[in-house]
Amino acid sequence: MFTQFGATSESLSKASTMMFRIGTDAHLYDDPDDVSIVPLLDSKFDSEKCEALKRLLALIAQGFDVSSYFPQVVKNVASQSLEVKKLVYLYLLHYAEKRPNEALLSINYFQKDLGDLNPLVRAWALRTMAGIRLHVIAPIILVAVGKCARDPSVYVRKCAANALPKLHDLRLEEHSASIEEIVGILLNDNSPGVVGAAAAAFASICPNNLSLIGRHYKRLCETLPDVEEWGQIVLVGILLRYAVAKHGLVEGSIMISSRSLVKYNSEREDLEPCLARKENPDDISSEICSEIADVVSRSYLEGPEKYLSQLSCMDKNPSSMDISHFTSSKSNDDVKILLQCTSPLLWSHNSAVVLAAAGVHWIMAPKEDIKKIVKPLLFLLRSSNASKYVVLCNIQVFAKAMPSLFVPHFEDFFVSSLDSYQVKALKLEILSSIATCSSISAIFLEFQDYIRDQDRRFAADTVAAIGLCSQRLPDVAKTCLEGLLALALSESSNGDFASADEEAVLVQAINSIKTIIKQDPPSHEKVIVYLVRSLDSIWAPAARAMIIWMVGEYNNVGGVIPKILPTLFKYLAGRFTLEAVETKLQILNACTKVLLRAKGEDLSILRKIVGYLFELAKCDFSYDVRDRARILKNLLSHRIGSPYLEEVKDQPEIEDLAHVLTESIFGGQTKPPSCEPLSYRFYLPGSLSQIVLHAAPGYEPLPEPHSLIYDESCNISTDVQGIKTSGVGVAHNEPNENDDSEAVSGSSDEENTSDYSSQESMSGSSESGGSGSASDVNDNAGPLIHLSDADLTHRNRVEVSEENDASGSNGVDELMSKRDLESWLDENPGLNQNSLDLGHVQRSLARISIKDFGGLVKPKSYTLLDPANGNGLSVDYTFSSEVSSISPLLVCLHVSFRNCSKEPMSDILLFEEESNRSPDSSDQSVSESSPVSRSEVPTLVPMEEIANLEPGHTLKRILQVRFQHHLLHLKLVLGCNGRKHLVKLRPDIGYFVKPLPMDIEEFSNKESHLPGMFEYIRRCTFTDHISELNDKYESSLVKDNFLLICEKMALKMLSNANLFLVSVDMPVACQP
Amino acid sequence: MLQCIFLLSDSGEVMLEKQLTGHQVDRSICVWFWDQIISQGDSLKLVPVIASPTHYLFQVVREGITFLACTQVEMPPLMAIEFLSRVADVLTDYLGSLNEDLIKDNFVIVYELLDEMIDNGFPLTTEPNILREMIAPPNIVSKVLSVVTGNVSNMSNTLPGATSSCVPWRKTDLKHASNEVYVDLVEEMDVIINRDGALVKCEIYGEVQVNSQLSGLPDLTLSFANPSILNDMRFHPCVRLRPWEANQILSFVPPDGEFKLMSYRVKKLKSTPIYVKPQLSSDSGTCRISVLVGIRNDPGKSIDSITVQFRLPPCVLSADLSANHGAVNILADKTCSWSIGRIPKDKAPSMSGTMALETGLQRLNVFPSFQVSFRIMGVAFSGLQIDKLDLKNLPSRPYKGFRALTRAGEFEVRS
C-alpha cells in the first residue's frame, strides 16, 4: 500500500517529464504490480499478455523474483505474436533453471518453432531452447543444433554456433564429440558471419583442438577480414595459437631474438649490471631490452606463474629450444598469410580487433616489421577513455620489451589534464621507459609542468619517473639532481601545513635523489651536504629519515661530510624528541654507522652525543625506538665505553664478536643496486589477465611451439591415413579433404592389413628403421613415444618388409618349432605370402614406435659362470635387442667378464663346443626342415679374445649367437688361463619374437589358438581416445592414455623378456 | 564471455539486469561495486576493468549511466568495453539521449535490444541498421498509436535481409524519394601548450561522417586531394581496403543513414587558430590572474562559441574574476568557465581578477590548466580536402553535399 503511495508521489514529482513519457512503458516500470498479472497472462488478447509480460520484465529488471508466474508464462509460448514470444523467451531464460519441470513443458513448442518458415522464429526457438539449461533435453538440443547448423539462413546458423557453448556448458561428456563435429562444420561455413560465431564457439568449447583449425587454416585466414568484428577478435587469437603450435616461433621475432641475445649476453651478465646494456638506447644492439623481452616471451609460452616458479628454483634455466624450432615468416606460407590477413585489421574501427591483430604481429612478425603496429596502437589512444586504459596497459609491456618501437612517438604519451589518474600513471611509466638521450630534454620539460599539476599524487609519480629516467640515462643524472633539489627546496618552503599529498611529492623527490646518489656517491657529496643543510626546512618525517640515512650511509665519502658530522649530530640530538618515530630510528642507525667510522677527536664528541641519544631513546614512547636503542647500545658497547657493560669488557672475545656484528650490520657499504630478477608478470597481449595482472580463470599461455606436427607431404603421396603422436600434442595426419572418409574407412576395411609392428621400435636405439617416417624429423627433445605413420615412403616400406619377409620366412619358420609353441610363433608361409600380396594392393600400416626406450629397459641378467666354479672368473650375460648385422637369426648378447680373484687372468675366450657343430643332432627337428641357407649362419660369431683381465676389472664383449631352438640351451666352452669351463647359454624367448605382418582375420584366427598359455585378460576402454579419433582424424593435445599404456607394457615386456600377447583394437571410426 | 550486464543509474540504483548465460550473477555484485565507487571516489569510476572478489567487472560510463558487465573467465577486455560502448551508442541512438528516466521508460526496448545484441555472452547483432529493422525505435507515431490503440508491437516479424547479405550493414531493398548523400569532415583539434607558451602537441583528430540517403545498392568512391597528410586512420567495415592500400581511395557500399566512414589523425600541425595566454602571479596570499584570448592564425571563417574553462586550484579560497567580453561563471566544483562566443573585431577579450589563497600559503604552488573550446564552421583545419565523390549503381542523379567543421578537442593550455 505504502509502496504504491510512494510510487505515485514519485511519478507526480516527475510531472514535468510526463509529457515525454506518454506512450512509453514508463508506467509499467514505475508500478509494475499495481494490477494483478495472472489474469492478464491468461487473457486471450495479445496486447494484454504483452502488458503482463512487460510488467514481469519490469519486476525482473528491478530485482524481484517473479518465478512463481512461471506456469502461466510458459503457456504463452504457443502464442503466434512475435512480441509475446520474445517477451516469454526473455522471461523463460531468466528462470528456466529454477523451474526445470515447468520449462520442460515448453520444449514441444520450441521443436515446432524450429520447423517454422520464418528464420527469425527458428533462431529464437533455438536460442531459447539451448538457453534452458537442462540435462534432460540436451540430446534434443544437440539434434536441433545439428539441424540448424545446416539451415539455409545465415542468421540461424549463427545462432546455432552460439548455442554450442551453451550445450557444452552442461558438461555432457558423451556429447562433446558431436559438439566438436558441429563446430567443425560451422567453421567450414561459407558465410563469414557464421565463421566468426563458430570461432567463438571453438574458443570456448575446444580451444586446444587446434588440428580442427588446421583443416581450414588458409580459408579462415582469407575470410578473416570479412568476418564481423567480434568474431575477428576471437579468430585472430585462435589462428595465432594454431600458427605457434604448428610452426613454432618466427625467426627474428621478439620471441626469439631475445633468446639469442640472452645467450650472447649471458657471459657478460655477471660482470656488468644490466644497466650497462641500456646505456645507448639509440644503439641497435640495445634496441630490445633483451632481458624483459625474454621474460615476456617465456611468460607468453609458459604463463608467468610457471615461469616465476622456475625462476625461484633455478635462477636461469637454459633455453631449451634449438634453432630447428624456429620458422621464418618469409619462407613459411602459413605464417605469411596470417600476418598478411591480420594487417588490414589494424585499421579496424573496433579497438579490440586492432589490439588482437597487433598482438599477432607482436608475437609472430620479425622485429623489423613490428613497427607496423605502433601507429594503429597509438591511434587507439584517441578512442574512448575506457579503452585508452587497456591499450596503455598493453603498450606498456611492448614499450618495456622493445623501447625502440615507441621512442619516436614519445609525444603521444604526454599527459593531458583530462586523463584519469590511472592513465596518467601509465603514461609516465611508458615515458620513463622509452626516454632516450635525444628525447629526454623534451620529456623533462613536460615533467616540469606535471610537477605543478593539481593532482599531487600524479606530481609525486612524476618525480619518481624522473628518478627512473636518470637511472636509465646516467648522462642526465646531474640535471635531474639539480631539478630535484630545487623542487625539494620549493616544496619544503611551503611545507608547514602541507597535506599528505603535498608531502608525497617532497618525499618522492628525496627518494629519487637518493637513488641517483646511490649510483655514484662520491661525485654527489655536495648534494648530501646541501640536503643536510636544508634539514631545517624539510619537515616531512619520511624525507628527513631518508636524508639522515644518506648521511649515515655515506659518512666517510669525500672530505666535507665527515667534518660536519659532529655538528649535525648535535643538532639532531637536540631535536631528537621532536622527531617522528621513523626519523628517530634512522638517527639511531646513522649515528651507529658514524661512530664505527669516526676517528680522533670526533670520536669522543660523537661518543658523547651517541650516549646522550641512547639515553633519550631509552625513555621514548615508541617500543621500536627503545628496542633499537637497546640493541645498538649493546652492540656499540666497545665504542661507547658504556659503564653498564663492564663485565663484557673483561671478555675480549665477546667484545670482538660485538664488533664484528656491528661491522657487518652497519659497516658494509650497500652494494650498487643489483639486477633483481625481473618479477613482472606478463600475459598475452590483449588478455584480461594482462590488465588485472593475475591469470584469470581460463587464461592459457601460447601452446608449446611445434606441439602440433604433421607432414603434409604425407597427404599428397598416399591416401592412407597416418597417425602421428607426440607426448604432448597429438596430431593426426590430414588426408586431403575429399579423401578422408575413404581413408579412414580404409583402415577398418577388411582388406587392409594392420601391422602392429614393434620390431625396430622396441629396440633401444633411436633409429626407427625402415619406416623413415616423420618421427625422425623431430628432435631429441621429442617425446618418448611416437605413433608414427609408416606410409610416408609407402613403396619403400613395402619393399623393405618384403625383403624382411623373404629372408625372414625362411628364418622364421626355422626358428620356430611347430611342435612347441604351436600356432603363435609358427608361421605359415603360404598365409604370409597371401597377406603380403594383399599388402601390395592396399596396405595400411600403423606403427607404434617407441623411441629412446633403451635407457628405461632394465634387462635381466643371467649368470654364465659362477666365480666359485670359474676360479674367480665371473661371467654374466644379458640379452640385447640389437639386431645383428650379420644375420637376423643371430641374437646379440652382452657378456661381461669380471675377474674376482687376486691374480690377473689371460686368454679368456668363448667358443662353441665341438658337438654343437655336428650337423645332425637328433633332438633338433628344426634342422631337418631347415633349408641349406641355414647352415651358412654360424652358431656363434667368434668372439674377440680377452688377452688379459686384471683383478677387479670388468670387460664387456658383445656376442652374437644363433640358438637352435627357443627352449634349448646352447653349450659353449669358456676358456680361461688355459682351462676350459663348460657353460650353457639359456635362450630367452622374448628375443625370438619377430614381427609378422598379419591381417585382422588371420590375427584373430591365431589368437584363438593361443589360449592355454599364460592367459591374463584385462580390458579397458579409452573413451577419450576413441572419441577424438571418432570425431576427426586428429586428436587434441591431451595426454594420450593409450600410448601411456603401450609404453608401460613395452617396458614390462622388454625388462622381463617374457612373451605377452597384447592385442589392441585400434579405434578408428568410419565416417559416414 | 560476458555473463551479465547491469545498467546502473547515477545514484547506483540497478535499473536493469540482463543475465546472459546460465551462470547467473547476483545483483549483490552491484552493491559491492557501488561501495567501491563511493569509498574510492572518482578515480575508480574511470578504471574500466575491476577485479572484484568474485567477478571481473567492466564498466563504461555514459551520461551518468554505468554499463556494468561481469565475467568470471578470461576474455579480451577491450571486447567487453567496445561492446558496452556499442550498447551505449545504440541506446543513445534509439532513445535520443541517455538518462535514467529514458532507460526506465523504455526498459522493454532496452531488454529487446540487449537480447538481440548479445547471445550467450557473445555479441550477436550489433549493426545499428539491422537492429533498427528488427526492433523499431520508439517514435512519436508509435507512441501516439500506443496511447490510442493500447498496444503496438515494435518487433519486426521478419528477419532483416541484410543478416544474410554480403553487406550486412545495409538493407537490401532501400528506396528513397530523394537520393542524397552528405559527406562531412569533422575535425577535432588536440593541442597542448606548455607553461612557456610553446606548442607541445598540435594534431587533428578527424572523422569523415557520411549521411547517405540512397536507393538500391550504390557503390561510392571518395578520394582526397591530399591523402598523404593523413598519419593514422581507421575505417568503417564497409570500406574496401585494397583500393585504399593501392591508391588511397575510399571505395564502399554505404550503410543507410549516418555513419562514421573513417577516422584519421594529422599530426604535427604548426599553429592553432586562436591563442590563449594565461598569466598567474601570486604574492603574499593573493594571486593575480589574467587570461588573454585572440586570433593567431585566421582560418578565413569566423570562430564560434569560444569558451575557456579551468579548475581553480584547491588552495584557492575565493576568486573575483571579470572579463571585458563574455561571461565568467564559477561553478560549485571550483570550475570556472569563461564563455566568449565570437571574438569582437575591435578588442581582444581578456579576463582578469584576483584569487585569495588559503591562509598561510604565500604563493601558488599548483597551477591550473585551461581547456579551450571553439568551433569553426566550413573549415577542415588539417587542410584535408575531398577531391571527388563518385556514385555508381544509382537509378537517378543524386544530390551530393560536402561540409567541414573544426572544433577544439583536447585543447589544453597550461599555466
Image (spheres, coloured by chain):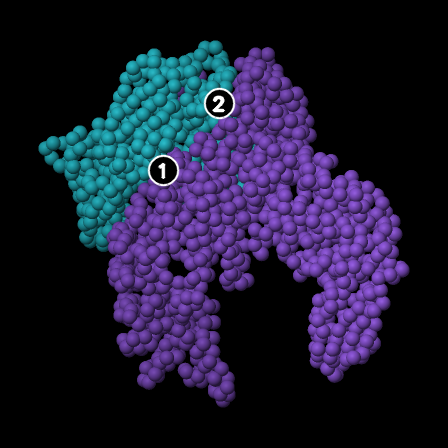
* Residue extending farthest right: A922
Q: What is the distance, in whole Å, between disc 2 and disc 1 at their CAs?
A: 30 Å
Give the labeled residue for mark 1. A383
Dot 2: element: helix
Element under disc 1: loop
Which amino acid, by three-letter code, is at mark 2? Ser
Check disc 2: other Cα within 10 Å, few if <14, some if 14-19, many if 20+.
some
The answer to whether the residues at label 2 and label 1 have Cβ atoms under 8 Å apart is: no
> In this picture, is B204 found above or below A423?
above
Which class describes the residues within 10 Å of circle 1: few (<14), some (14-19), or many (20+)? Answer: some
Please name the residue shown 35% across and 67% down the image. Answer: A518
B319 or A143, which lies in front? A143
- The correct choice, above or below, for A476 with respect to B400 in the image is below
Residue A367: x percent and y percent? 39, 49
The amino acid marked with disc number 1 is: Ser
Looking at this view, is A145 or B204 the one in front?
A: A145
The answer to whether residue A475 is seen in the rendering is: yes
Name above or below for residue A12 compared with residue A439: above
Towards the viewer: B280 or B4: B4
Horizontally, residue A404 falls left or right of residue A897, namely: left
- Chain identifier, cyan in the render: B
Left or right of B383 in this view: A1019: right
Residue B68 versus residue B228: which sits nearer the camera? B228
Q: Which residue is drawn at 57% across and 16% down?
A: A117
Chain letter of the residue beneath label 1 in the structure image: A
Residue B247 picture quarter: top left
The image quadrant of residue A605 is bottom left
Chain depicted in purple: A
Spot the residue most to the bottom: A650
Residue underneath mark 2:
B164
Whether residue B314 can be seen here? no
Residue at 62% across, 34% down: A740
